[in-house]
Image (cartoon, grey):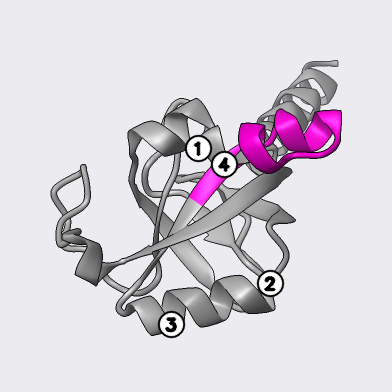
Amino acid sequence: MKLSYTVIFFSLLASAAFAREESILARVTSYWAGEGHKYASTGRRLRSGHCAVDPKRIPYGSKVVFPDRTCTAVDTGPAVISRKAARLCGRTASQIKAIVVDRFFETKQEAMAWTSAHPHFMTLQIVRPGSHAEPSDL
């Protein structure tokens, strides 16, 4: 009997660890170094592969999996927290309620090219820090 309780406990513990991975609808915007952004709100120097999130919804250090790359959540901003882009251009209730993820690029040209080649809204995979799950393209 004691063994069955132990197995149940460890099964619940394992499922909680894997529950740190989720898919979420996001309005994806972009920003670049030329806008005066050199350092993230966390103090880290911004580089390609970083993104800004609402840290209440996506903790810093989380991996945000885009169709072409996995980025690390290291920054935030008032427009990301207020979800301004989603509220202004969302056409459905789920789009209007979507989170905003602002992806960082080194140049304006890279940012504009990526933005024009991808939809405004997309489902992103979020892997929270400490999760045992690994993003598929890390």
Is 40 situated left or right of 75 in this image?
Answer: left
Q: CA distance from mark 2 to mark 1?
A: 22 Å
Viewer-closest of 50 and 2: 50
Q: Secondary structure at mark 3?
A: helix
Within 10 Å of disc 2 (Cα), the crowding (few <14, some 14-19, many 20+) is few
Please tell me whether residue 102 belongs to the stretch shown in magenta: no
Identify whether 102 is placed above or below 30: above
Residue 92, image x and y in percent? 86, 35
* Residue under numbered circle 4: 85
Which is more N-terminal, label 1 or label 3? 1
* Residue under numbered circle 3: 110
Is 61 situated left or right of 18 in this image?
Answer: left
* Residue under numbered circle 1: 58
Q: Secondary structure at mark 4?
A: helix
Residue 100, image x and y in percent? 55, 42
Identify whether 47 is placed above or below 53: below
Give the residue type that dot 4 points to: Ala
Q: CA distance from mark 3 to mark 2?
A: 12 Å
Q: Is residue 54 visible?
A: no
| Front position among marks 2 and 1 | 2
The residue positioned 68% from the left and 58% from the top of the image is: 120
The residue positioned 72% from the left and 23% from the top of the image is: 9
Which is more N-terminal, label 1 or label 2? 1
Viewer-closest of 106 and 133: 106
* Residue under numbered circle 2: 118
Within 10 Å of disc 1 (Cα), the crowding (few <14, some 14-19, many 20+) is some
Within 10 Å of disc 3 (Cα), the crowding (few <14, some 14-19, many 20+) is some
Is 2 situated left or right of 100 in this image?
Answer: right
Q: Which residues are magenta?
A: 87-101
Residue 37, image x and y in percent? 20, 59
Give the residue type that dot 2 points to: His
Image quadrant in which you'd find residue 16: top right
